[in-house]
Image: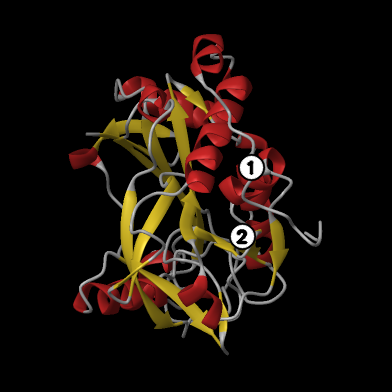
Amino acid sequence: MIIHLNGRLMPLEHASISPFDRGFIFGDGVYEGLRSFRGKMVGMERHIARMRDGLREARIDWDPSPLTRMSEELIKACAMPDAFVYWQVTRGTPGPGQPVRSRVPAGRMTPTVFGYCTPQPPIEKFVNADPPTVTCAVCEDTRWSRGHLKSISLLGNVIAAIEADEAGAQDAILVKNGLVGEGTAANLILVHGRQIVTPSLESVPILAGVTRAMDLDVAPEIVSRPVKVEELASASELMLTGTTTMITSITQVDGRPVGDGKPGPVARSLLARLTRAIAVELGFGDIVERIRVDTLSPWSSPVSASR
């Protein structure tokens, strides 16, 4: 396996990071998860902007502008054109004489920049296809209030995923103060009545997903608003949406079927629209020609265009 560490490509077994790195000691860092199809990166302007915002908020001094080039170098070195590409930037390692456990960083550090990739399905898999499926359990969101920050400190997400697994589900739907947030690694979309809804970023501390933003671009019918946990039980469709999940239908929540327990028409249409948008962005004319994009209007009648 080839990885990217501090500007260099190298075999995994040659990589070395100090155990005093603040990412290891404190979870002091931010990350991004990217997607490539046919060796081309998706949504990089948004990913880079989000990482830049996260680094600025964390006061970590690193410029993510080269992320596209670095990602392309990595997937080429790994001979992996269809991939999930992970990058994390930690604050770095304290220098000699600097305190290891000081919460406030002592002196200037060189950030540690690490990336790897894993294989993913090609774009052809999503052409005119039913969405993949997942089962979920509702779990209390006990994470911190900076849910918009893509922090490497993901213990809250891990605990929720373990709780869902213990309940016999594959993922968790996180709920805080009676309001629905997101999954452990993806945003949420539901069909409630004749409205297609995604939880608003202002109602609960959740991530502003890049794929969520693309969904809003390709489907202006989607309404962004607070979602009460009671609405999950009456939703005719539930979906996760994210970099690797694309559009994934939730077929069960807490052991109860969602709708008829199968991917619904809105999920199929959203997956088609998202796949087409990615193909247009990356210049895959052959994929664009093959996709039939159904209108959402028979299933939605949004009352608001609020984002």
**What distance separates the C-alpha of mark 1 from that of mark 2?**
42 Å
Q: Residue furthest top?
A: 286
Residue 165 % position (x, y): 23, 72
**Which residue type carries mark 2?**
Ile
Helix, strand or loop at mark 2: loop
Residue 84, image x and y in percent? 38, 38
195 and 153: which is toward the camera: 195
Q: Do we see residue 259 in this rendering?
A: yes
Snapshot quadrant of residue 59: bottom right
Mark in front: 1 vs 2: 1
Residue pushed farthest bottom? 177
Q: Residue at x 39, y 59 (%)?
A: 250
Identify which residue is drawn at 56% across, 30% down: 68
Above-or-below relation of 289 to 138: above
Task: Name the spot of residue 148 as percent of width and height, x first.
Answer: 62, 66
Query: 16 left or right of 88?
Result: left
Question: As rendered, which of 306 and 163 lies closer to the eye?
Answer: 306
User: For mark 2, does the 10 Å Cα neighbourhood hold few (<14), some (14 to 19), or many (20 or more) residues?
Assistant: many
Q: Is residue 100 left or right of residue 150?
A: left
Q: Which residue is mark 1?
A: 296
> Which residue, given by chain and number where applicable, does mark 2 sit on?
60
- State the residue in front, 122 or 270: 270
Residue 18: which quarter of the image? bottom left
In this rendering, the answer to whether 216 lies above or below 304 is above
Of residues 68 and 236, which is closer to you in this image? Answer: 236
Query: Can residue 229 be seen from the camera position used here?
Result: no
